[in-house]
Image (cartoon, grey):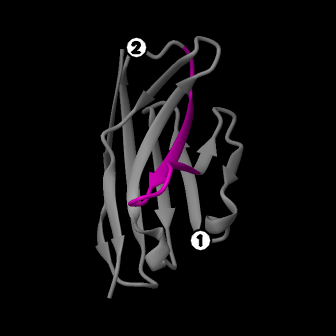
Amino acid sequence: QVHVVESGGGLVQPGGSLRLSCAASGTMFTTPIMAWFRQAPGKQRELVATETSAGSPNYADSVKGRFTISRDNAKNTVHLQMISLKPEDTAVYYCNVNFPMYGLDYWGQGTQVTVSS
């Protein structure tokens, strides 16, 4: 079992910045793929950014150039640095820890990000 906890959400004005953090603990079968998703009210959950254990990041087009994902494999943590935030970035942000070889997928409880003046 893997426990996933996000932190760092909050209220920020348009153009502001936030840094989200995610810590995974428990039985790590291998080095997982770690990702950030978000879900806005009335919308489906969408992938924001992902990074493999080898450090290859991928981003949704809507956040490229503004969000940066980074991870520390030794600590099983992943962060999402968000700059130039827009109201449309408002959502609950979820951390995902995935072990594709084992078909195992774990989610955190989510952290609210609200971008508003």
Q: Position of residue 108 (x, y in %)?
A: 35, 37
Q: Secondary structure at mark 1?
A: loop
Location of residue 26 with respect to 51 vertically, above or below: above
Alpha-carbon distance for marks 1 and 2? 33 Å
In magenta stretch: residue 39: yes
Residue 49 can be seen, yes or no = yes
Q: Amino acid at mark 2?
A: Thr
Q: Quadrant of the C terminus?
A: bottom left
Residue drawn at x 58%, y 15% as measured from the top left: 103
Please give the range of residues in magenta. 30-47
Left or right side of 55 for 29: left
Query: With respect to residue 6, does 9 lie above or below?
Result: below
Determine which residue is flagged by label 1. Answer: 66
Query: Observer-nearest residue: 90 or 9?
Result: 90
Whether residue 22 is in magenta: the answer is: no
Residue 62 or residue 43, whichever sits in front: 43
Is residue 22 rendered to the left or right of residue 67? left
Badge 2 element: loop
Q: Is residue 80 above or below residue 31?
A: below
Pointers 1 and 2 in contact (CB under 8 A)? no
Q: Quadrant of residue 26?
A: top left
Q: Position of residue 47 (x, y in %)?
A: 58, 49
* Tag of residue 81: none
Residue pointed to by mark 2: 27
Can you give x and y, in whole percent of width and height, for residue 86 in the image?
48, 78
